[in-house]
Every structure is written in structure tokens, then in C-alpha cells.
């Protein structure tokens, strides 16, 4: 007999799924019957939250949805935080869980792992959640999920299988060799024409490019060069224009100089950006504004009308719309490069010394390891990077310090990214506080043979929060932590672990780490950060 659980593996394979992150439990073992001997790799994290973060990193590194198998009840409550991060950053994630059998589901009778309503639990962190009540309902549910991933704003989807349905026979069901896949809309022709006319008439255009536009780098570059328009890239949009491009603005829109550039523009084109506060109003001073004509391209029609409604709105794929606009606008020369240079000059005066030191460290990582993917937690190097890091390519720098802003993300997300892109170096940025949220995933990296490089800032606690509390005249309570001997712990898990005593030692340490087949932990303190500017020069 082929059970519905086994049938699920066949369906996932037909959609090109090659990796599943999950922890087997008594309520999900039937799902694993189908995995054994299939083309799908299973990766076991040490916590369901880690499974979700791994799926998130895998999705960002590959462009494919990260898939998780999760048990009923506690497995679902554990993964909700990871779903929240993925929801905030528009990351495709498929969470497949079990749920108690019909007749027990939501009964309140105390069955193992029983929750009153799992769908209600995840309703705020998923594009949709559905219960598969019959084997025949599974394929349509997956088709709905991949329709979201392929043609709409990608966000987590939750599908739950009652245990009795998971065990039910599915011999009568077939799997299409190539299931239907949808394309994203290309944008309304009239709206594109109106937008092109406004851009043609502009004297000082500016483009805002967000994480939803990383698949449109070539098209945005062509459009920006035709318009001679500076491109302000959000944290998740960094790398859309390459390092050294004269129109690239790699500085946060929360910086006064970047805001001045945007406010001086007569026409602003936003592509794939939600105008989120953590990118545009990081300090919550409310000073970000777009006084000029605003044109907005987004795959999500509801998002078009949030924060700042546009004068011209285009629902469509970033690449298709940018390509369409480039074909319609005239090539012209403004003073785009000069305006970008002015922003750079002003920003370098505004960035604190500590951030400059951290940016030197990030640039050393980027330049030492060509093709590197950097996955960051909420930590001080990341905050500096979000302010002014110049990424080498789209999607090569991401972290959890934007949007939802969870801790414990960096290590498992980096593991997922390395599994998705085994031939690229992956560097994780984490602090000693955040790492302890997911410390056990050190074992997962070893087990999965994912030789990530962990840059661990050990400053004895939540340093950024401590500084914030002191600045607000709040006694710094709860931020000075007992931290373990991380090097000893790393070695106990089988990692290569060492302390970086000098910034000059960073490059050889990274080069050696990239050659190892085991993960590497490089621990550094505030003294190392302070040395970066002098030694980096």
C-alpha cells in the first residue's frame, strides 16, 4: 500500500524539492517511510525553530522554497518564530505538519501534542494554512502553495495532515510528471506607459530597490543606466548594483544623506520594496518621506497601498516591469553619479567609528572569499552592514535584523544556505547572546557536512541593547550574561575553533577555513573590532 504520507514524497519530488528539514516524531514517522530511498535529502536540526531558519537560509540561497516536516503541537509552536521571520522577509517556506486524527483534533481531551487549533496559531505568519481532510486534497493543497511561491508574494504556507489521513491509502492517486507552474504578472501596459512618461520627464529620478527585486538585478541596472538614476538598495536588496557602480547607493535610507537624496528627487520609482521601517525609518524618527511623484512596482497589490501610496502603481514581477520600463524610457544623462558621490561623502561623516571598523571587517570577508554568502543574526556587525555594507551580488547578504528581527537566526540560516549552495563559502555573523538561542545547531552543521564559517563576536552579553539602555538612562539590567568557553564547545562538537587575536589574522583564518571540510568558529572581541580600521588600512 502507498500511504498518503508516501504519496506526499512523490508530489514533492515532482515539484523539484530536493531537501527537507525536520525532526521525526511519533506523529510524523509515516512521512519518513516515503523519504527513505527517495531523491529528497533529509536534514535533522536540533530544534524545530532551527528547521525553519535552515529552510529560510536554504530558500534565500537557492530561490526555491525551503520545506519542513514538523510534528503536531510543540513542533508547530517551536517553528512559528521562524515562520514569522520568513513572513516578514517574503521568503518561500512550506511547513508540512501533522495534526491529531479526526475525532481527536481540537477535542480538548488531552491527546498527545493536542492544540486547540494549529491553523489559528499560524494564521498571522503564513500566506495560508489548510487541513488536508482526504488523500485527494493533498495535491490541490500543494498546487496552491506553489502557486503562491511562483506567482505571488512568497511567504510561508502551512499544510497539516491529520494522522488518520496520513496513514490512509493513496494507491489510486497519480502524480503529474510536470505539475502546472504559474508565472508572475508582467505589469499592466497602460500603467507601464504612464510610469515611463513620468520617468522620461524627470530631472532627478531615484530608484528604490528592495528584497523583492533581487531577481531583477540586470533589468534594474539597465533601467538605472538609461535614466542615469541613483539606486538606493535596502538591506535585502544589496548587490542589485555591483560594487563600484557609480549609481549604486549602498547606504540605509534611514541615513540623513540617503533621505536627502530621495527627498530631492522629482520622481521616485520603488521596485520590490515594502518601505519597511527597519530599512527606511530605523531610528523611528518619522523623517523619511517621498515628496516627489512616486511610482511603485510590487507583486503584492495590498503592499502597493501601504506606508506611502503611489501616484502610479504597477502590480507585477520586478524583472518584467523593470525590463518593460527600460524599453519605454529614453536614454538620458542627468547628474546621477554626482548625486551618489555627494551621498557617499556625507554618509562617511555620519557613520560612527565603531561601525566603520565593522564595515572593514565585512569588506575583508567579502574580498577574501569570492562568492561568499553572509548570513547574519541580530548583532553589531550586522547593524553596521545594514547601514552601509556593499554586497558583491544580489542575495549574498541577509540577516534577521530587519523586519521581524529575531535572535538565533544566523547559525541555522547559514547551515541551510550552505546546504543549498555547497560550492559557495558561507559566513555566519553572530553575537554571543544570539548564538546561545541556537547553540545546539553546531551539531547539525557537523552532521549535515555543512562547513560554514562562524564569526562570533564575544562581548559578554547583549552589547547593543546594553548601549541602548545606557543611552536612555535605563539601568542595564539583564544584558550582562554568563557566557561559556565557546572555543571548547565548538571543539567538543567537532568544529575547528580559534580566537582571532589580531585583524591581520582574519584573512589567513578565512582562507584556511574555506579549505576545511568541517565548520570553523572564529571568536573575536571588541579589541579585534577596534583594531580593524588601523590594521585594515
Image: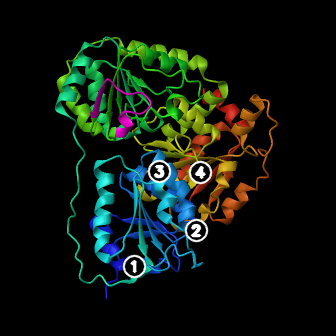
* Disc sitting over residue 86 in the figure: 3
Among all residues in the image, which is located at the extreme bottom? 1
Query: Which of label 3 and label 1 is nearer to you?
Result: 1
Q: Residues within 10 Å of mark 2 (few under 14, many from 20)?
A: few
In the image, which residues are magenta? 302-314
Of residues 518 and 448, the one drawn nearer to the viewer in this rendering: 448
SS label for mark 1? helix
Residue 104 on image: x %, y %: 50, 79
| Residue annotated with mark 1 | 166
CA distance separating discs 1 and 2: 19 Å
Query: Which of label 3 and label 4 is nearer to you?
Result: 3
Of residues 396 and 270, the one drawn nearer to the viewer in this rendering: 270
| Residue annotated with mark 4 | 454
| Residue annotated with mark 2 | 74
In the rendered image, which quarter is residue 8 located in?
Answer: bottom left
SS label for mark 4? strand
Whether label 2 touches label 4, CB < 8 Å = no
CA distance separating discs 1 and 4: 39 Å
Residue 303 on image: x %, y %: 38, 37
Q: Residue at x 51, y 49 (%)?
A: 85
CA distance separating discs 2 and 4: 29 Å
Q: Is residue 175 left or right of residue 358?
A: left
CA distance separating discs 2 and 3: 19 Å
SS label for mark 3? helix
Mark 1 or 4, nearer chain start: 1
Amino acid at each position: 500500500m502507498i500511504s498518503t504520507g508516501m504519496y506526499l514524497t512523490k508530489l514533492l519530488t515532482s515539484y523539484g524539492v530536493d531537501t527537507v528539514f525536520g525532526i521525526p516524531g511519533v506523529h510524523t514517522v509515516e512521512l519518513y517511510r516515503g523519504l527513505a530511498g527517495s531523491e529528497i535529502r533529509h536534514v535533522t536540526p536540533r530544534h524545530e525553530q532551527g528547521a525553519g531558519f535552515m529552510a529560510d537560509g536554504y530558500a534565500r540561497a537557492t530561490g526555491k522554497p525551503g520545506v519542513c516536516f514538523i510534528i503536531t503541537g510543540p513542533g508547530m509552536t517551536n517553528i512559528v518564530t521562524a515562520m514569522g521571520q520568513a513572513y516578514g522577509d517574503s521568503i518561500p517556506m512550506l511547513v508540512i505538519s501533522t495534526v491529531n486524527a479526526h475525532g481527536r483534533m481540537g477535542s480538548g481531551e488531552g491527546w498527545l501534542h493536542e492544540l486547540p487549533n494549529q491553523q489559528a496559531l499560524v494564521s498571522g505568519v503564513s500566506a495560508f494554512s489548510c487541513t488536508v481532510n482526504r488523500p485527494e486534497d493533498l495535491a490541490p493543497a500543494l498546487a496552491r502553495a506553489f502557486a503562491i511561491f511562483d506567482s505571488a508574494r512568497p511567504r510561508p504556507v502551512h499544510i497539516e495532515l491529520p494522522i488518520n489521513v496520513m496513514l490512509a491509502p493513496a494507491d489510486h492517486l497519480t502524480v503529474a510528471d510536470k505539475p502546472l507552474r504559474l508565472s508572475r504578472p508582467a505589469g499592466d501596459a497602460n500603467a507601464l506607459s504612464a510610469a515611463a512618461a513620468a520617468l522620461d520627464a524627470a530631472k532627478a529620478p531615484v530608484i528604490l530597490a528592495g528584497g523583492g527585486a533581487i531577481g531583477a538585478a540586470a533589468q534594474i541596472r539597465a533601467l538605472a543606466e538609461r535614466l542615469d538614476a541613483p539606486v538606493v538598495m535596502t538591506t535585502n536588496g544589496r548587490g542589485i548594483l555591483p560594487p563600484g557602480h557609480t549609481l549604486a547607493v549602498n547606504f540605509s535610507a534611514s541615513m540623513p544623506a540617503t533621505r536627502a537624496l530621495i527627498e530631492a528627487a522629482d520622481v521616485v520609482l520603488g521596485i520590490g520594496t515594502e518601505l519597511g521601517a527597519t530599512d527606511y525609518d530605523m531610528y523611528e524618527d518619522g523623517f523619511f518621506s517621498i515628496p516627489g511623484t512616486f511610482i511603485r512596482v510590487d507583486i503584492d497589490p495590498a503592499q502597493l497601498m501601504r506606508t506611502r501610496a503611489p501616484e502610479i502603481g504597477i502590480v507585477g514581477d520586478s524583472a518584467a516591469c523593470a525590463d518593460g520600463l527600460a524599453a519605454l524610457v529614453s536614454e538620458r544623462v542627468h547628474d546621477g553619479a554626482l548625486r551618489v558621490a555627494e551621498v557617499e561623502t556625507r554618509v562617511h561623516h555620519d557613520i560612527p567609528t565603531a561601525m566603520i571598523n565593522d564595515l572593514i571587517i565585512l569588506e575583508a570577508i567579502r574580498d577574501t572569499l569570492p562568492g561568499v554568502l553572509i548570513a547574519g543574526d541580530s548583532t553589531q556587525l550586522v547593524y553596521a552592514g545594514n547601514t552601509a555594507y556593499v554586497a558583491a551580488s544580489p542575495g549574498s547578504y541577509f540577516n534577521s535584523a530587519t523586519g521581524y528581527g529575531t535572535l538565533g537566526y544566523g547559525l541555522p540560516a547559514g547551515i541551510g544556505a550552505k546546504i543549498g549552495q555547497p560550492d559557495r563559502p558561507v559566513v555566519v555573523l553572530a553575537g554571543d547572546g544570539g548564538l546561545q538561542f541556537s547553540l545546539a545547531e553546531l551539531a547539525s552543521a557537523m552532521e549535515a557536512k555543512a562547513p560554514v564559517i562562524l564569526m562570533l563576536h564575544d562581548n559578554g552579553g547583549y552589547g547593543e541593547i546594553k548601549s541602548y539602555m545606557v543611552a536612555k538612562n535605563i539601568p542595564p539590567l539583564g544584558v550582562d550574561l554568563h557566557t561559556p568557553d565557546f572555543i571548547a564547545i565548538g571543539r567538543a562538537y567537532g568544529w575547528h575553533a580559534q580566537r582571532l587575536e589580531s585583524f591581520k589574522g582574519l584573512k589567513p583564518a578565512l582562507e584556511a577555513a574555506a579549505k576545511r571540510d568541517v565548520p570553523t568558529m572564529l571568536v573575536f572581541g571588541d579589541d579585534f573590532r577596534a583594531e580593524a580600521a588601523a590594521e585594515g588600512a
